[in-house]
Amino acid sequence: MSKKEDDKRYYEKNKEKLIAKNSKLTIERNYNKRNTECRYSMQEVEWWSRYQSQNGNCAICGEPMLPHGRGKDVAYVDHNHETGEVRGLIHSKCNLIIGHAEDDPQLLRLAAEYLERN
């Protein structure tokens, strides 16, 4: 069994405990706090509400996210770059994918087709 599978199994088994523990912590531990509040006008309560409504999972890939820290499995606020509207919370790695594609769905479709062909 891979580390990712072990981590996912651990997360699923301890999800409620982890969410409860993390929701008691201040989002100050999340290095995105200033950006979250200033850029997206999203307060801590709203952030946690969204995180819990997504069951702690990425809005793109559906995999579990960590509420704070650094790395590819940490939750990031995803937003529309034209309107500033928050779309959801997503993994750092998923955020990079759509960011590098400049939010262009057609480019992402073409990339998926390319991967499926090759």
Image (cartoon, helix red, strand yellow):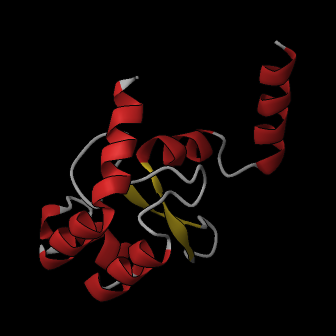
Q: Quadrant of residue 97?
A: top right
- Relative placement, left or right, of 115 versus 97 is right
Q: Quadrant of residue 87?
A: bottom right
So how many labels did they put on this image? 0
- Relative placement, left or right, of 60 versus 48 is right
Write the residue at 20% across / 58% down. 31
Q: Position of residue 46 (x, y in %)?
A: 37, 86
Write the residue at 40% across / 23% down. 1
Q: Residue furthest top?
A: 118
Write the residue at 39% across / 32% down. 4
- Relative placement, left or right, of 90 versus 39 is right
Q: Position of residue 63 (x, y in %)?
A: 50, 49
Location of the C terminus by quadrant is: top right
Q: Position of residue 104 (x, y in %)?
A: 75, 49
- Residue nearest the observer in this picture, 43 or 104: 43
Relative to 66, does residue 54 appear above or below in the rendering? below
Relative to 113, does residue 62 appear above or below in the rendering? below
Write the residue at 78% across / 32% down. 112
Q: Quadrant of residue 2?
A: top left
- Residue nearest the observer in this picture, 5 or 114: 5
- Residue nearest the observer in this picture, 56 or 104: 56
- Relative placement, left or right, of 117 versus 69 is right
Q: Position of residue 67 (x, y in %)?
A: 29, 61
